Amino acid sequence: MISVVSDWPGYFAEIFRVTAPGGHVQITEMSTVITSGSGKLRSDSGLKVMERALQKHAALNHLDNNIRSKLSTLVESAGFHSVHETVVEIPIGAWQHGSCEQDAALIVDAILDKVGTMMTEHISEQVGIWARSCMIEIGIPEDGVDLYIEKIRQELRDPRLQLSVKAYASLFRMSLKVDTM
């Protein structure tokens, strides 16, 4: 939603308006910052170029690229309560092994490998759509964009980079009774 919502207070006010008393809502926003657990992702990498392009695109279109840190405040301002926010580091690729004790590690590693592989596939597919249009819109020539996209896809598949992205999930609910003043 980061790339399409320009009026977040209005967006949450409308969600509040249509949520039934006692209803629950969950919003999840992904970070546009991809991090490297190994520290091997260079500032001139395709992923970092894409990150800067997305930031510039957001600024040009008056979109709040840092909305994730404000979600709880915005939903409370709209009238929701019982806001619970969770930040989860999601792996990109199948690189994360040995994170738990013995048998549990095998199960967790298998799940994280699957999640990481799915994230790689999803981002690789989507980068050709949204990142491409953002890069072109901010003035990167199309042939250069195509080179960056291929570089990004190669970086996403490189397990030595140990890539991950943060997801910000907010769960909140409407009161069971509505004030009638």
Image (cartoon, grey):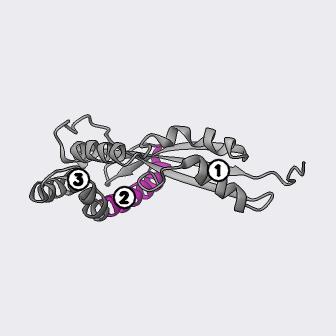
For disc 1, the marked residue is: 171
**Residue at 55% of width from left, 48% of height from top?**
8
Disc nearest the viewer among 2 and 3: 3
* Left or right: 29, with 161 as reference point: right
Residue type for callout 1: Leu
For disc 2, the marked residue is: 119
N-terminal of the two: label 2 or label 3? 2
Viewer-proximal residue among 155 and 65: 65
- Percent of width and height locating residue 41: 22, 39
Decide: few, some or many residues near mark 2? Use Cα within 10 Å; few <14, some 14-19, many ≥20.
many
CA gap, disc 2 to disc 3?
21 Å
Residue type for callout 3: Met
Decide: few, some or many residues near mark 3? Use Cα within 10 Å; few <14, some 14-19, many ≥20.
many
**Residue at 89% of width from left, 52% of height from top?**
180
Disc nearest the viewer among 1 and 3: 3
Magenta span: predominant SS is helix
Report the span colored magenta. Answer: 100-123
N-terminal of the two: label 1 or label 2? 2
Viewer-proximal residue among 92 and 82: 82
* Left or right: 177, with 128 as reference point: right
